Amino acid sequence: MVSTDRFLAFAAMSLLVIVIPGPSVMFVIGRALAHGRRTAVATAMGNLIGSYLLVVAVAVGIGSLVERSVTLYLAVKLAGAAYLVYLGVQAVRHRKELRASAIATRPEQPARGDLRTVLDGALVGVTNPKGVVFFAAVLPQFVDHAAGRVPLQMLVLGLIPISIGLVTDTLWGLTASAARGWFARSDRRLSLIGGAGGFTMIGLGVTVAVTGRAD
């Protein structure tokens, strides 16, 4: 299996990459600002699922195919970008409804269904260009081919960035949702923060769409 040295080296590499906010972090922040803490946490869980699907794809060889094919990579990137823009537009359109939602919503009655929120996060996570590049190009470098069971090694190593990402994304989301609580005391402020969250997602979607590959 994976040696301790490789495990620690990959953990350090993962931390360095994850510390730099990418599409997943910005998406969680945007959802937190638009819908609150519960949605932020559910979104982070969705990102975790989507990101690990990328790990599985790389383990079975699909991830490398996507990374090497310009057409497939572009399709994945644009699909994720389009969905981010769509969600951002929806948040902007419904920003004036946030006040009523903030007052009426209880922990057991989230403004947005948990399953839908998790699926949204998973879709963004699995189409995240940063994740595709990292798992397809970096993850295989830390596998010990001589030890055998390469796919299993990738699945185990993939748990490292997934776990780190879950913690950091959740912290970002909780921080953003805490700031949202202050804005909830004013209709105008909450409407502004909801619009800000929406425009953040729209801007992120556009950025993802126009950002090219490093090759």
Image (cartoon, rainbow, N blue to C red):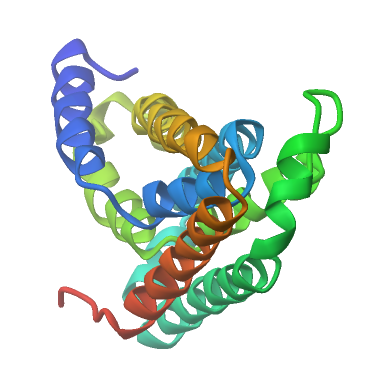
Residue 69, by quadrant, is: bottom left
> Which residue is pictured at 64% across the width and 39% down the height?
39
Residue 166, by quadrant, is: top left
211 vs 208, left or right, is: left
148 vs 84, left or right, is: left
Can residue 124 be seen in the rendering of this structure? yes
Q: Depth check: 101 or 142 in front?
A: 101
Could you tell me residue 63's position as x and y percent? 44, 60
Q: Quadrant of the N terminus?
A: top left
The vertical placement of 4 against 189, above or below, is above
> Which residue is pictured at 49% across the width and 55% down the height?
193
Q: Depth check: 91 or 56 in front?
A: 91
Could you tell me residue 194's position as x and y percent? 55, 57
Could you tell me residue 82's position as x and y percent? 55, 79
26 vs 34, left or right, is: left
Could you tell me residue 128's position as x and y percent? 43, 60
> Which residue is pictured at 30% across the width and 60% down the height?
133
Can residue 53 be seen in the rendering of this structure? no
Residue farthest to the top?
A: 4
Total marks shown come to 0
Q: Depth check: 29 or 138 in front?
A: 29
